[in-house]
Image (cartoon, rainbow, N blue to C red):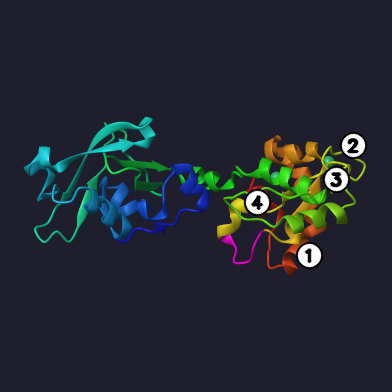
Amino acid sequence: MTSSVITPSAAHLRFFGIRKKDFAASVISAKDEAKKGQITCTGKEYDILSGFFKGELHTGKAASDPDKATKQFVLDNAGGQPVPLKLVYPKEGKNELRLYMSKKNGFRPQAGDIWYVYKRDSKKLHIGFMSRHEWEQIGKQDPDDADYQQAIQAELAGQPVMQTRYAYPRLLALAKSECENAGYRCRVDGSHQSFISGTNGKPFVEVHHLVPLGQQSHYTVTLDCAANLVALCPNCHRQLHHGEVTSRNVLLEKLLADRKAALATAGIDITLAGLEVCY
Ligand SMILES: [Zn+2]
Ligand SMILES: [Zn+2]
């Protein structure tokens, strides 16, 4: 009966463009929900749905008053098109709020999928679903990386750094130390060629979080720590973010071999296989 609640990360909230209090998500259970095509809305889902459709919800079977049972949602899976879905209190006591899936209307999550509902403005209620893998991909992006690299260049030059509000906060002093400790060389291979930075006159290196910041929710210690920061030439850095899997994993293997002990000391225990799936 109980669904497992999913908590959105800061990146998820940015992705959906909403505040945490206006968003609820949970995993579709195999037995009760996927099989019957019905979702029992609990907790925050209940609060958001019942709050939005206040006073307009039908009590009784959906079939007894299809018009009143049908509510309009914006379905993210349908590219934000409005779709009708049935939402009722099936029992007189109104102790259960039930949402009906609809294959025809495009809302038919499978067992293990994450479904969500959120309010972006007062007129529309958004709904949607995705696989757990898709959900986890959202947290892996680092939309602030370009700002971060620019700020590191300024920090190395001792210039004032513009304040940026990062989705995942990070300390520039740590990044600066990593550049210095690396001797402004790539941690994959010190002979990698870069160029001289126009900001600080040093060989240009970028700083990367080996265990990506998007994984923060899985750790109790901060991922923005010295052990997790690696200076890289721009080419290796781009390869980690955009490269093809096999050659990218070669870089990860080398970098993790060098850092595994330090990461463990910092409270970040991770295997190569565990690291590879973070990318
Ligand atoms: Zn990076
Ligand atoms: Zn390199």
Residue 37 percent location from the top left of the image: 27, 45
Of helix, strand and loop, which mostly describes the magenta segment?
loop
Quick check: 216 above or below 120? below
Which residue ends up furthest to the left in the rendered image? Answer: 64
Sequence-wise, the earlier of marks 4 and 2 is 2
Q: Residues within 10 Å of mark 3 (few under 14, many from 20)?
A: many
- Quickly name the residue at label 1: 261
Q: Is mark 4 within 8 Å of ligand 1?
A: yes
For the image, the number of numbered tags is 4
Residue 257 percent location from the top left of the image: 80, 56
Residue 278 percent location from the top left of the image: 63, 49
Residue 122's quadrant in the figure?
top left
Q: Residues within 10 Å of mark 2 (few under 14, many from 20)?
A: some
Q: CA distance from mark 4 to mark 3?
A: 18 Å
Q: Which residues are magenta?
A: 218-223
On the picture, is 103 further left or further right than 230?
left
Sequence-wise, the earlier of marks 2 and 3 is 3
Residue closer to the observer: 124 or 275: 124
Q: Which mark is residue 186?
A: 3
- Quickly name the residue at label 4: 212
Q: Secondary structure at mark 4?
A: loop
For the C terminus, which image quadrant? top right
Q: Is residue 222 magenta?
A: yes
Q: CA distance from mark 3 to mark 1?
A: 20 Å
Which residue ends up furthest to the front in the rendered image? Answer: 160
Q: What type is the residue that disc 2 sits on? A: Gln
